[in-house]
Amino acid sequence: MNKENLKKMRIKNPFNNDVVGEILLKTESEIDILLKKAYNFKYKENSKDRAKILNNVAQFYDDNSFTEALLITKESGICIKQALYEVKRSVNALKYAAMHAEKLDSNDISSDYIMNSDNSNVDLEVIVEPFDLAIAITPFNHPLNQVVHKVAPAIAAGTAIVLKPSEKTPLSAYRFREVLIKCGLPDYAFIVLNGLDLVHTVTQLVSYSNLDVVSFTGSVEVGKKIEAIMKDNGNTLKKYIPELGGNAAFVINEDADLELASNIALSAFDNAGQRCTAIKRILVHNQVADKFIEKFISKVKDIKYGDPFDENNTMGTLIDSKAVEQIYNRVNSAIDSGAKLLYGNQTSKAVYSPTVIDSVLPEMELVKEETFGPIAPIIRFNSIDECVEIVKSTSFRLAGSIATKSLETAKEYSNRISVGQFSWNGPPGYRTENAPFGGFGSSGNGAKEGIVHSIKGLMKIRTFWRHN
């Protein structure tokens, strides 16, 4: 096998194992050259020009939504319905980034820092400008939208960005760069790369001395390792934005509308449960648990799943058979420890059925850790105090929600669990592309993403005092 073949990685569809594309892997020296190119790049385009590029890309994805969604399905196994929704979200994110970019150059914030009592002989100018270089690392789930949420704000801000997408689902990221270049983005404003060795490549990227920001979405374990690598290589004081795991609890209070609650609970299966904000625990008040389960199970049984290319299906595969095996083992471990399987736990290669399991205990691995799959584990409780204790028994603080008729109850509960985003009578994963997004504890360090915060996070502020 020649050297060029050694540098190629084939990407296979999780459902049928067909080869759906390939990428070229970069050597260490090639990556070093690209990092220097990105660091030395400076936009000649003003913010309005960059907004136009983003809008043109948004229009392209809007016009070609099925084709681009099909690429997502091919590489990730996400069903085509969910992939189409991902493209729609990506289009919205691009439009939001363009809207904010449009006014960046003309937005003078100096007046926000001036008071009438300040020295009239000294004038203040507050200068907001882009960082030189951001490094972004994205996971396999949402292979387009995750990328757009990191890259579009960088373009809006005027910051060069180097992205390493997941080796499991890199094709949408490379395609996104191709579309951006066609729409007028300069070559080195945005670079996509994967290296010959995953760990070595991540280490090389986050150790680069000239980086300003590292934005990472992925597991807690890897997120902590990246922070340690940055510290060990002189980047301790560089900005680090980790978006890590979640273990969202959906609480069904005794006064909840059970029809509404059973519909909300179905979001546990969105994206085959491979979302950091997906419902990972369903906490149900004992007084209404049996009635809720009856409604919920009848709806879960109607879910069509399997072939992600079948437009009638609402759930495709997991990312690979290894992920299926891990979830299957966790469910069986919970059953062995006393939990009751109500529906599902069927497997076929990378396909795992929607699964509902009752009488789950908070200490079971299934709910103590983040289980990244289509599982609806039901935990029963008798009081809000007990519920809060259960929810806070894990260190994840990303998202949560409650079904209750009382706004007061919802607000009190939200304040007690203090997660990054919360919904009353809605799913924990609900968000808009513009809103702040990010968690606490094992879910993150409090830094926020979302288009608005991401643009601000990719810019620096200086002051210029003019003494008269």
Image (cartoon, rainbow, N blue to C red):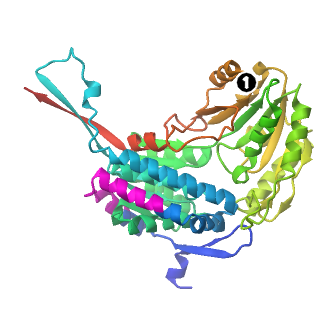
Locate residue 299, reporting x and y percent: 84, 47
Residue at far top of view: 117
Element assignment for label 1: helix
Q: At x 49% / y 50%, what residue is drawn?
A: 93
Which of 232 and 434 lies nearest the eye of the viewer?
434
> Residue 120 vs residue 90: left or right?
left
Locate residue 429, reporting x and y percent: 65, 41
Q: Quadrant of residue 183?
A: bottom left
Residue 430 appears in the rendering: yes
Magenta highlight range: 35-59
Quadrant location of the N terminus in the rendered image:
bottom right
Which of 15 and 102 lies nearest the eye of the viewer?
102
Residue on which the image places disc 1: 388
> Residue 23 vs residue 332: left or right?
left
Residue 142 appears in the rendering: no
Dot 1: within a 10 Å radius of its alpha carbon, few (fewer than 14), some, or many (20 or more) residues?
some
Q: How many marks?
A: 1
